[in-house]
Every structure is written in C-alpha cells, then in structure tokens.
Image (cartoon, coloured by chain):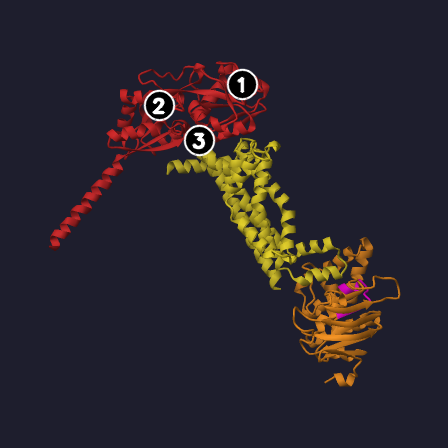
C-alpha cells in the first residue's frame, strides 16, 4: 500500500510543481496518471520509485509481507523511462543481466529468460542487438526485463507516446497481462489511447494538485 | 643514396630474421608499457568516474588539473622522478633508479592523465538512465559500475590505445630514469635515441619501423573504436 | 643619379655575396669525442687558433665511433679521436689522410668509496677488472662504441673476462650520464680523467686505479680524404691539424689545467703503435 503525505517537489529554487496533502492507494489497480506536459508527471513517478528525494513530505510503501518499508526497494517498485535504457548487448543479454544481478544461475536463469522472451513475443529476436529493435519492441523488452523481477508496482512514463498504432496495441496487451499477473501499474499519458481506456483508476495533475479517482468521462476529452 | 638503401635493407633483415638483440629491446618496451597501462587503468577509471558522475566542490578545478597534467613534457616527469628516486632523494632508499620498475612508475605518471581525461569524457557521455536502470533491476553498486564501464567499452579501449601509444613512444623519462641499460632498461625509443650515436643506423631504423607500424595499428584500431563509440551514442 | 644609386646597390650586393661566400669557405667542421669537448680543452684552444687564422671551427662532440663515421661519410673536414686501431682502419680504408698523434690523456677506474669489491690494487688495471668480474660487482659500461668503450673492451680482453657477469650494465650513454649512473647505483666504471675531474664534486665515487700504462689514451688528428668528397674544407682542416702539432699548440695543450690538474700531455712526433697493449684491438 502506498501512503503519501504533505508531498511537494520542485527543481532548484523554483516553486513546487505540485503539492499532494494526502494520497492513499491500495496498489492493485491499473492507474492512468494524466496531466499536461510539464505538469510534473515524470517527477511524481520518479519520486514514487525512490529515484529522487522529495523536497518535503513522505512516501511510504507498505507490504503485507516484511520488506524494506521505504523506497528504493529494487524489484518491488520499478520505474520505466519514457525511452527505456537498453544495455548495449543482445536482447537475451539484457535479460541475462537481470538474472545475474539477482543471483540466478545455470538452468534456472536460462529457463526464466527463455520463458520471458517467449511471453513477450521476443523469442525470434533473442540474439539481435537490443539497440536495433523498433520502438514497440524496445518497450516490450524493457517490460520483459522488469517482469523478470515480478514487481509489485510498475511506474510507466508515457509507455506509448512515440509508438505507431500496431505497437501501441502490442504494448497495451503486454501491460494488461502484466496487470492480470498481479502487478499494480501507474502509467502516465497525456493523451487517451487504447491503453488508457483499460484503466480502472484515474489520477489527474491539474493546477498544481493531484485529483484522485476523477471520473473517466471527465478525463476523456 | 646507396648507403641509405643498404641501411634499409639491413634494418629489414634484422626485423625479419628475428635478431635476438632487436626483439629483446622490443620485448622490454612492450613489457614496461603494458604493465604501466594495466596498473594505471583501475585508478584512472575510478578517478574518471568520480569526475564524471559525482558532483563535489572543486570538480571543475580537478578536471582542469587532469588536462594540465596531460601537457606536462615527458622530460619533466623524468626529471622529477629522477630527483625523487636518486640516492640523495627522498625515495632513494628504494633503489629503484635505473630499473624497469622506475620506468613503469614514470610511464604510469604519463599514462594517468591521458587515460583519466579520455575516460572522463567517455563516461560522461554515458546516459544517466543506464545507472538508474541497472540499480532498479537489482544490480549492486559495483555491478552497476561494471555495467557502466561495459557500456562505455569502446571509449575505454580507445583511451587505453591512446595512452599506450603515448608511453611506448616517449623517450624523455625512459632515458632519464631507465638509463638505456642493455638487457634491462633499453627500450625502442632509448635505443633509437642513443644507439644511433654509435653509428648503428640499421638497428635504429628497424626499431623506428616497429614504432611506425605500431602507430599505424593503434590509429586504425582507434578509428574503428571511435566509429563504434559514436554509433553507440547516436542510436 | 639613378644609375649611380643602382651601381652603388650592385656593388653592395656583390660585396655582401662575396663576404658570405668567403664565410662559408671559412668554416671547418671538426668531429671529436665528448671527452675532449666536455673537459673544456677545445673551448680553451680553438679561440686562440681562430685569433691567428681566418677559420671558424664548428665542433661536433660525439663518440669516437660516430666521429669516424661522420668522417667516413664526408660530413666533417677532420676528426680528433682516441681509438688507434679504429683510426688505423679508417686511414687504411682511405677514408682519412695525414694522421698525427697530438696528445695523451689517461683513464681512471672509479668506484664507491667503500670499495665493496676490494679492487683497490693501486696501479694494476687488468687485475682490478678481473676482480670486478670475479666479485660480480656492479659495473657501468659505456657500451656506446666510444673510444672509452673500446678501451674498456680491451681491458676486459686483457683480464681474460667476458663482460657478462652479474653486475655488468651497458648503458649506451655518454661519460657524464654513466658516471652519474655509477654513483647512483654505487658501481664501478672506467672514465677519462677530464670528465671525472669536471664531475667528481657531484658524484659519490672515488678513484680506485690510476697510473697504469694500460690506461693511457692517445689522441690523433686525421683529415678526411679530400679525394672522396667534394666541398671539404681541407685547407682549413690542414691549418688546424698543423697548428695542433706545432710548438704553439703543443705548449698550450700542456699548459691546460682543469681544477688545477693537467689533463692532456702533448705528444706530437711520438710514434703511435696500434698494436701496443695500450690500445684496443677492435
């Protein structure tokens, strides 16, 4: 469960981008974080992932099982950049990195990597250089890499922003299956799409405030 | 002209017949310079990472300092090291003067600024997202560091090649602290500089050819590495 | 008016041309060993020669091997060296003409003050060298094919030693560098007395052996054969060689002092015998 209180953040001496007096989220739903460009969506996601330290206020993640309570907790809450960073190696190599860092060895590592490539439709590209993939494939590889860790929460920064229609459909399907597999997701998007249609909850950054559970009808312009 | 042709022919003969004296000199050069690079690389990497990734007060001054050291003439390094290692110097007790170790120390000092400056710029160009991604996906601090270096591998190799080219071709400090002692500290450059005084031009020319060939190989490799490095950045 | 100016200009230009042409012919190039140059002997002699003769001497201080090579290639007009056998070969091969003995100086064996190898044998250089090899003492050799190096090689031969013992180091550098190296490594070396006197204040070394006739060192002046190359200043070279062996030159050589000590002993007219034990056999 996520609990946020008195949270505010901004850069340098500039005034805060927004202020969130209080927010509670059970961490099961598929959330669409909406807001105009520059409204501070990325900053909020990075704060929730523990990649930035807030200027003021607290962020607390609590889990049913015993876990480090506050971010960063790698593998539990993961943030994906709008342009995911792919390591300069093969597609399978990117997944093998994750396997190695988490101490999986031998057949365990091999099986998990192979299964994930299959599940994300990347098996045919396994030996290809990651950086030669198309935009949709890159996002799928980034999702596959994250999925290997079975995160509780994924924070996706504009996952479909620069993709064509077919790629959006593929990525959306993958995000849906991730959610169905038990991973809560917050995704930011400034425009509605096939993907945002599927969301169960809506957060909206507007006039330096976060409006939670705004009605779908109000949001969809 | 006739004389020149004869010398050239003799030089080629020395090279191709694997003249033991000649190849011993080449061996000393490579052993000293390779050791110096291997020893200098880890600290240079750490300093470069520090300069590229950590914002600390005086960072810009430190970067300027590294660039300044790059311009220090090799004879000045030789002179300072000579004074330090001399019997009357503060480190005289170590009895390092006129040994390969002393030459290695000199070449480390010469290689460090080149390595650090080039590694700094290559590590600086690595995306901030690489570190965040590795850390989030469960990599430890050292594992993330290693993956960062691996991402910059073409730049790292380019830095090593450039530094190697600089130290194997330098003569100033090699003569002063090595002493050009046969079988011990006689390197390609000291042999060319001092053996020619004997009138033995063929050996000098042969060693010169080796250096020229080495420079060609290093530059071709550097070109390839630069190309690949750019490719990585631009994609 | 104009023609007068023109003719004046032409005269001026012509005379400048003549003067510069004459100057070029006046230069005599002398290749000699670092030992004569470093001792200051040439700085002392040559101005006196240039005072009375219309020549300007350019000195190229190198090792004897290189000096003879420069002569062989016609890059200099005359040589002043100290390696009799190599000089004999140089003359026999017609590279040089009119060899004349000019002077002697001598070599000394120096070493660290404690004399760790216990060679201090007074005057016996051969015996000292044999002891050095037996003890495996640190010995810095010039190893640069210079006259001193040839002298040293000859002494090893006399001592019946192949110089590859434990402490033997061939530096391939000049006398000054080798003395510094010997001092730093606290080893022994063979040096000409001139360089030794000039440098001994800065060195942590002492004389171990001196006065052995085997350590004497004869200098010859040889003209480069004018028949082999065009454009040599043989006239100037001849003037310098003759002046060096004249009474005036010889007296000046005997009078030269470095730090109050006589370095060179004039010896013109004495016969130089390349097969004698004094000289190397390279």
Instruction: Locate the C terminus of chain C by quadrant.
Output: top left
**Residue C125: % across, % down:** 49, 16
**Which image quadrant is residue B235 in?**
bottom right
Chain drawn in red = C
* Above-or-below relation of A133 to C249: below
Residue A147 colored magenta? yes
**Disc 2 designates what residue?**
C256
Mark 3 element type: helix
The image's mark for residue B198 is 3
Percent x, y for residue C108?
46, 20
Do callouts 2 and 1 mark residues in contact (Cβ within 8 Å)? no
State which chain disc 1 sits on.
C
Q: Is residue B13 above or below residue B121?
A: above
Q: Colour of chain A?
A: orange
Residue found 59% across the figure and 40% down from its top: B105
Q: Where's the N terminus of chain C, which quadrant?
A: bottom left
Judging by colour alone, the chain drawn in yellow in this rendered image is B
Q: At 79% across and 68% down in the image, what residue appears?
A: A59
Say whether disc 2 or disc 1 marks the residue closer to the N-terminus.
1
As measured in the structure, the alpha-carbon distance from the residue carrying label 3 to the one carrying label 1 is 23 Å
């Amino acid at each position: 469960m996520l609990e946020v209180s008195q949270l505010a953040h901004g850069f340098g001496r500039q005034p805060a981008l927004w202020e969130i007096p209080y927010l509670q989220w059970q961490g099961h739903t598929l959330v669409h974080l909406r807001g105009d460009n520059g409204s501070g969506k990325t900053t909020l996601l990075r704060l929730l992932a523990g990649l930035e330290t807030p200027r003021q206020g607290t962020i607390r993640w609590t889990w049913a099982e015993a876990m480090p309570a506050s971010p960063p907790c790698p593998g539990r809450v993961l943030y994906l950049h709008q342009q995911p960073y792919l390591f300069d190696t093969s597609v399978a190599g990117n997944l093998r990195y994750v396997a190695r860092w988490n101490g999986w060895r031998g057949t365990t590592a091999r099986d998990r990597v192979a299964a994930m490539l299959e599940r994300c439709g990347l098996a045919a590209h396994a030996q290809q250089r990651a950086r030669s993939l198309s935009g949709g494939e890159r996002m799928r590889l980034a999702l596959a890499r994250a999925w290997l860790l079975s995160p509780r929460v994924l924070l996706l920064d504009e996952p479909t922003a620069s993709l064509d229609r077919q790629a959006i459909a593929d990525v959306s399907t993958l995000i849906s299956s991730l959610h169905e597999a038990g991973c809560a997701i917050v995704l930011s998007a400034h425009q509605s799409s096939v993907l945002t249609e599927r969301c169960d909850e809506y957060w909206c950054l507007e006039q330096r405030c976060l409006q939670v559970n705004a009605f779908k009808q109000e949001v969809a312009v | 002209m006739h004389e020149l042709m004869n010398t050239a022919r003799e030089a080629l003969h020395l090279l191709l017949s694997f003249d033991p004296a000649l190849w011993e000199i080449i061996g000393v050069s490579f052993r000293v310079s390779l050791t110096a690079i291997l020893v200098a690389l880890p600290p240079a990497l750490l300093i470069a990472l520090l300069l590229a990734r950590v914002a600390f007060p005086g960072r810009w001054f430190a970067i300027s300092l590294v660039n300044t050291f790059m311009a220090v003439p090799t004879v000045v390094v030789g002179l300072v090291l000579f004074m330090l290692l001399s019997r009357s110097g503060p480190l005289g007790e170590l009895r390092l003067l006129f040994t390969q170790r002393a030459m290695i120390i000199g070449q480390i000092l010469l290689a460090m600024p080149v390595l650090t400056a080039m590694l700094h710029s290559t590590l600086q160009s690595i995306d901030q997202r690489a570190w965040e991604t590795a850390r989030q996906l469960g990599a430890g601090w050292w594992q993330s560091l290693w993956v960062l270096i691996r991402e910059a591998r073409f730049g790292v190799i380019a830095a090593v090649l450039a530094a190697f080219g600089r130290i194997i071709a330098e003569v100033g400090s090699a003569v002063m602290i090595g002493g050009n002692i046969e079988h011990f500290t006689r390197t390609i450059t000291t042999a060319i500089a001092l053996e020619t005084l004997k009138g033995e031009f063929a050996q000098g020319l042969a060693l010169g050819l080796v250096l020229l060939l080495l420079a060609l190989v290093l530059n071709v490799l550097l070109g390839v590495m630069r190309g690949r490095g750019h490719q990585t950045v631009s994609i | 008016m104009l023609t007068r100016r023109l003719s004046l200009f032409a005269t001026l230009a012509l005379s400048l041309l003549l003067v510069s042409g004459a100057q070029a012919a006046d230069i005599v190039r002398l290749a000699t060993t670092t030992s004569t140059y470093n001792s200051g002997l040439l700085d002392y002699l040559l101005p006196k020669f240039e005072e009375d003769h219309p020549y300007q001497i350019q000195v190229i201080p190198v090792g004897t091997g290189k000096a003879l090579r420069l002569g062989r290639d016609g890059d200099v007009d005359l040589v002043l060296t100290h390696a009799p056998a190599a000089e004999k070969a140089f003359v026999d091969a017609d590279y040089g003409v009119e060899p004349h003995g000019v002077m002697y100086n001598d070599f000394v064996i120096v070493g660290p003050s404690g004399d760790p190898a216990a060679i201090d044998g007074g005057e016996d250089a051969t015996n000292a060298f044999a002891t050095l090899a037996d003890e495996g003492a640190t010995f810095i050799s010039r190893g640069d094919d210079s006259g001193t190096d040839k002298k040293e090689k000859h002494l090893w031969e006399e001592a019946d030693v192949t110089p590859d013992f434990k402490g033997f180091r061939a530096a391939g550098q000049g006398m000054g560098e080798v003395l510094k190296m010997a001092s730093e490594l606290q080893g022994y070396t063979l040096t000409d007395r001139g360089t030794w006197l000039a440098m001994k204040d800065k060195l942590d070394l002492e004389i171990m052996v001196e006065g052995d006739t085997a350590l004497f060192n004869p200098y010859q002046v040889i003209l480069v054969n004018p028949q082999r190359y065009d454009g040599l200043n043989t006239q100037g070279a001849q003037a310098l060689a003759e002046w060096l062996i004249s009474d005036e030159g010889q007296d000046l050589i005997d009078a030269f002092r470095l730090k109050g000590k006589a370095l060179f002993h004039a010896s013109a007219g004495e016969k130089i015998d390349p097969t004698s034990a004094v000289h190397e056999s390279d």
